[in-house]
Structure formats: structure tokens, C-alpha cells
Amino acid sequence: MPRLTTEGTYTDSPPPGHSTSYDADDDDDLLDQGRAKARRFLNGFIDFAFQGNVLEIAFGLIIASMFTALVTSLMTDILLPPISVLLPLNKNLEEKFAVLRKGPNFEGEKGYNTLKQAQEDGAVVMAYGFFLNRLINFVGVGLSLYGMAATYQYFSKDPIIKRTVKCRYCRKSVNEKAARCVNCTSWQDGREDRLF
């Protein structure tokens, strides 16, 4: 490639101090190295992202969040309103609260009608109904998940629910089918007792 000299003329010779062995292949080698690194990075990401365990965890989390939302809606929207009617609650369970310190606009006998009204007035409230609602939702989701796991285990040979017993030596939980304790390595069939 011609270059401009200090005299204002063009020449094909290399600048002083540079060798004449410059090749266009050096640029190609550098581009190939860059492409190889980019390809390696992309292949590594694809291997990681589409690995079996990662996909199983992702699908499991998506299904679990949808299942939790469904059971929460069942508990909050379907089961708790009839319970609020049957028990003398006079309002939805999550709207039950106790006023610990009254706000500036508190009216003596009338009080606050809703939790939001009390909080907007600056009252200190204990929202026990909201907590009980969450607790009932948690129990409902837990029982539903246990029911699904038990049903799956009934129709499948893959155990989800692992039954445990206490090791008779270290008193820690081990699988009921284990031959040895994973914590103290003692035999669970009583071999140590027969030796002595």
C-alpha cells in the first residue's frame, strides 16, 4: 500500500525501521481468532442454557409460580369469603385489624372501617387478618403440593417424598431404605450391636 513521504511523494517501500514481511494473512489470522473466540463463547452459552437441569429448573419455577397463584386465588377468592360469612367476622378475613394507637382523625365509637383508612390516618395497626390470610394460603399451597407429589409418586417409580427414620446411634434423619447412616456411617440393621 503506497504511503506519503515527508517530501510529499508516494512510495511503496515500508517506513524506516519496519520490515517488508507484512502480509494480508496476518489480518485474516486475527479475524479467524476473533471468530473462534466468539463461536466458543456462543457455544458455551448454548450448552449452559439448554442443559437438561437448567431447563428443568426453569420449567419447574414457572409451573410452581403459576400453581401458587392458582391456589392462592382459590383460597382468597373462593374459600375464605364463605368462611367469613359463616364465622361472625362481618368482613373479609384480610380486612381484620386491631388499632394499637389511634390516628388524629379517629372517631370515638365509629372507629375505622377499613385497614387502608386506618393506615392513611396514621394509626398504628396490627393487621392480623392479612397475616392469617397468608398463613391459610401457605397451608393450602403446601397441602396441594404434597397431594400432587403423592399422586405423582403413586403413578411413578421415581420417589419425590423420601421417608426418613432416626439413626439409632446419632439420632439424625436418614432414608428409611438406607443400609448405613450418612452422618455417622453406622449400619442401620444393628450389626454393631451384634459385634459386642
Image (cartoon, rainbow, N blue to C red):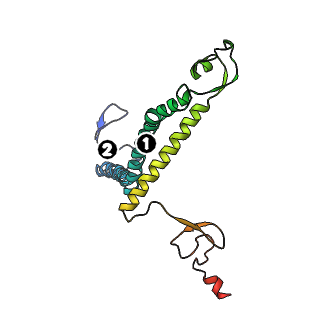
Q: Position of residue 117 (x, y in %)?
A: 59, 18
N-terminal-most mark, 2 or 1 = 2
Residue closer to the observer: 41 or 46 = 46
* Label drawn at residue 168: none
Labels in figure, total: 2
- Tell me if residue 155 comes above or below residue 141 in the rendering: below
Q: Name the one closer to the observer, 100 or 16.
A: 100
Which residue bears the numbered disc 1? 65
- Amino acid type of the residue that numbered disc 1 sits on in the rendered structure: Ser
Mark 2–mark 1 distance (CA, rounded to whole Å): 70 Å
Identify residue type, mark 2.
Ser
Q: Residue at x 59, y 78 (%)?
A: 187
Q: Which residue is mark 2?
A: 13
Q: What residue lies at 62% left-to-right and 21% top-to-bottom?
A: 119
**Viewer-closest of 85 and 75:** 85
Which residue is rendered at x = 57% and y = 32% of the image?
130
